[in-house]
Amino acid sequence: MSNVKVGFVGAGGMANAHISQVATIEDATIVAFCDVMEERAQTAADHYGGQYYTDAQRMLDEADIDAVYFCLPPFAHSDIERIAAAGGHHIFVEKPVSMTVDHGLEVLEAVRSTGVISGVGYQGRYQNPETALRNYMRNKTIGMVASHRWGGIAGGPDHWWRVMDKSGGMLHEQATHQIDMIRYLAGEITEVYKIDAMRINVDQANHTIPDAEVVTLQFECGAVGQITTTSSLVNGGGSMRTDFMLEGHIVVRLGWGSFEILPNNGEAIEISTEPQPGIDQAFIQAIQTGDQSLVRSSYADGLQSALVSICANQSAKESKPVSVPQVAS
Ligand SMILES: NC(=O)c1ccc[n+]([C@@H]2O[C@H](COP(=O)([O-])OP(=O)(O)OC[C@H]3O[C@@H](n4cnc5c(N)ncnc54)[C@H](O)[C@@H]3O)[C@@H](O)[C@H]2O)c1
């Protein structure tokens, strides 16, 4: 395949980040945009060229498209992703890919049965420090993983992010990046147990997500871990970090795109300075070559990360640990 014809479903904030990247790729052309907010789709089409739609099914029926980006809020994922993949379209889906186990498995089944290329927006996997760390940690014994993502509230009072049925909460919507990176470096999480609370953001309108979440993790390798989140730091003071306690009595302390190993008189890890293809370049190249391995998070992998937080939310509802279905391999 020479030129990859791309359509976008969702033309909001994250779509525009991908659109601006895809627009720079020589062998890709964006041919269609769809958003339920017509002016967003139209604005993108006016700027980049192509048709605009307000209905994704119509876009799939009418536009000549090889690949579709789904840049939708969690609640807006629907059967359209399965339909696109079942119809032979390569799909890129923004994280978190689903709100439910069943929907995710249906999309995955279509991806696997047609063999289309798939990608999910865990861009941390494309950064050189994380790549170096993955190689370093590959055969190391991990004892414990401790991660946190503490911040404020995304968007204003009308934003979908603060509504539990729409976003799935901070663990599912934002700390999914931490979950994915933990899986990338430490392997699969097999069981989760979450407790949560809502005590500080009670003064915030329309806020139905927990403002504090604590999750315990059981790893396939035998390690244990925990993740905490809060959206209560609306006036600043947020932070995010993941610590991995490793054999040799050391801790790998990972931020975003940088890490340190303590105590710092230990071995140094060489980090490549070669620019790597970004997440969009990798997806388009994978389509052109038919090589799914160029994409560092396939739909199956992205779904596996989403399943961790879906199961954690279920465990909080049921007040008991929940086993995480394993679908990535
Ligand atoms: N990978 C990352 O680092 C990263 C960063 C930000 C956001 N995201 C993810 O991207 C997704 C979208 O986030 P956003 O910030 O772009 O949200 P947004 O609200 O800015 O944009 C979402 C767009 O989808 C449109 N939409 C909703 N339902 C639709 C439907 N059925 N058909 C067509 N369009 C529809 C909305 O009108 C809106 O324009 C979220 O899941 C978010 O987690 C990922």
Image (cartoon, rainbow, N blue to C red):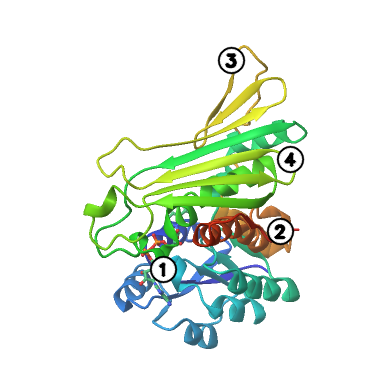
Work out which quarter of the rendered image holds the C terminus and state it: bottom right
Residue at the disc numbered 4: 222
Q: Nearer the viewer, mark 2 or mark 4?
A: 4
Classed neighbour count for the residue bearing mark 4: other residues with Cα under 10 Å, few (<14), some (14–19), many (≥20): few
Which disc, if any, is residue 121?
A: none
- Residue 318 vertical placement versus 31 (above, below): above
- First in sequence: mark 3 vs mark 4: 4
SS assignment at label 4: loop
Work out which quarter of the rendered image holds the N terminus and state it: bottom right
Classed neighbour count for the residue bearing mark 2: other residues with Cα under 10 Å, few (<14), some (14–19), many (≥20): some
Residue 171 position, x and y percent, is 47, 52
At x 32%, y 78%, the residue is: 38
SS assignment at label 2: loop
- First in sequence: mark 1 vs mark 4: 1
Residue at the disc numbered 3: 264
Q: Nearer the viewer, mark 2 or mark 1?
A: 1
At x 61%, y 73%, the residue is: 102
Given the image, on which type of amino acid does mark 2 rest? Ala
Residue at the disc numbered 2: 328
Residue 85 lies left or right of residue 280; in this view the side is right
Given the image, on which type of amino acid does mark 1 rest? Asp
For the residues bearing labels 2 and 4, Cβ distance under 8 angstroms: no
Q: Nearer the viewer, residue 80 or 7?
A: 80
Q: Nearer the viewer, mark 3 or mark 1?
A: 1
- Residue 316 vertical placement versus 7 (above, below): above
Q: Marks 3 and 4, how far apart in space?
A: 26 Å
Q: Nearer the viewer, residue 261 or 88?
A: 261
Residue at the disc numbered 1: 165
Q: Marks 1 and 4, how far apart in space?
A: 33 Å
Q: Marks 3 and 2, how far apart in space?
A: 35 Å
- Residue 77 vertical placement versus 220 (above, below): below
Q: Quadrant of ligand 1?
A: bottom left
